[in-house]
């Protein structure tokens, strides 16, 4: 399970060091794709296989399913983790997430999210203000 928040810098070659806390569980090859809220999702290959299998089970007859599958699957790339623990972020993903020099890695259960630092700060501030209301709604459906 991935948890925690880590700030790192993207170098001029679009490489960034994965947080040491995430490296072992992610492995030497990861799958990175466009995520929701304009961040990137990083999965271990095992976790990615589970996500892809769930997406494959959805009916392609529905436009929303086709669109979401295209969004997630066509935006995905297998990425090698080098001997220094760094990954290279593809241009299309860097552009999608608006990544600049300062980025944030956030552990979110089965995935790691990669955020533009400014967007993460704004998102986190907004979500922290709504945490009580979200907990209430989750409690109503028995999730908490």
Image (cartoon, rainbow, N blue to C red):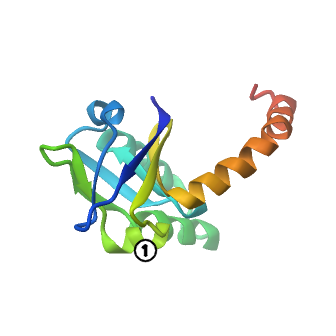
Residue at (56%, 60%) from the top-left corner?
A: 118
Residue at (42%, 49%) from the top-left corner?
A: 53
Q: Is residue 36 visible?
A: no
Residue at (20%, 48%) from the top-left corner?
A: 81
Q: Is residue 100 above or below residue 111?
A: below
Q: Is residue 85 above or below residue 90?
A: above
Closest to the observer, 138 or 40: 40
Q: Position of residue 138 (x, y in %)?
A: 79, 34
Q: Position of residue 111 (x, y in %)?
A: 45, 42
Q: Is residue 14 left or right of residue 38?
A: left
Q: Element under label 1?
A: helix
Q: How many marks?
A: 1
Q: Is residue 16 above or below residue 95?
A: above
Q: Is residue 56 left or right of residue 58?
A: left
Q: Quadrant of residue 1?
A: top left
Closest to the observer, 96 or 68: 96
Q: Position of residue 101 (x, y in %)?
A: 39, 63
Few, some or many C-alpha atoms within 10 Å of disc 1 (few <14, some 14-19, many ≥20)?
A: few
Q: Return the residue at label 1.
A: 95
Q: Is residue 91 left or right of residue 107?
A: left
Q: Position of residue 21 (x, y in %)?
A: 35, 31
Closest to the observer, 17 or 102: 102
In the image, farthest residue toward the left = 83
Residue at (62%, 73%) from the top-left corner?
A: 63
Q: Quadrant of residue 67?
A: bottom right
Q: Is residue 138 visible?
A: yes
Where is the C terminus found, in terms of image quarters?
A: top right
């Amino acid at each position: 399970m991935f948890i925690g928040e880590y700030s790192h810098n993207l170098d001029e070659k679009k490489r960034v060091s994965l947080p040491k806390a995430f490296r072992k569980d992610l492995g030497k090859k990861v799958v990175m794709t466009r995520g929701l809220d304009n961040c990137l999702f990083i999965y271990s290959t095992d976790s990615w296989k589970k996500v892809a299998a769930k997406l494959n089970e959805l009916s392609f007859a529905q436009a929303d399913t086709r669109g979401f599958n295209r969004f997630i699957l066509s935006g995905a790339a297998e990425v090698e983790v080098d001997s220094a623990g760094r990954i290279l972020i593809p241009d299309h993903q860097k552009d999608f997430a608006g990544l600049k020099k300062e980025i944030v890695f956030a552990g979110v259960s089965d995935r790691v999210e990669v955020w533009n630092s400014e967007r993460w700060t704004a998102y986190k501030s907004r979500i922290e203000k709504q945490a009580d209301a979200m907990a209430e709604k989750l409690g109503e459906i028995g999730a908490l």
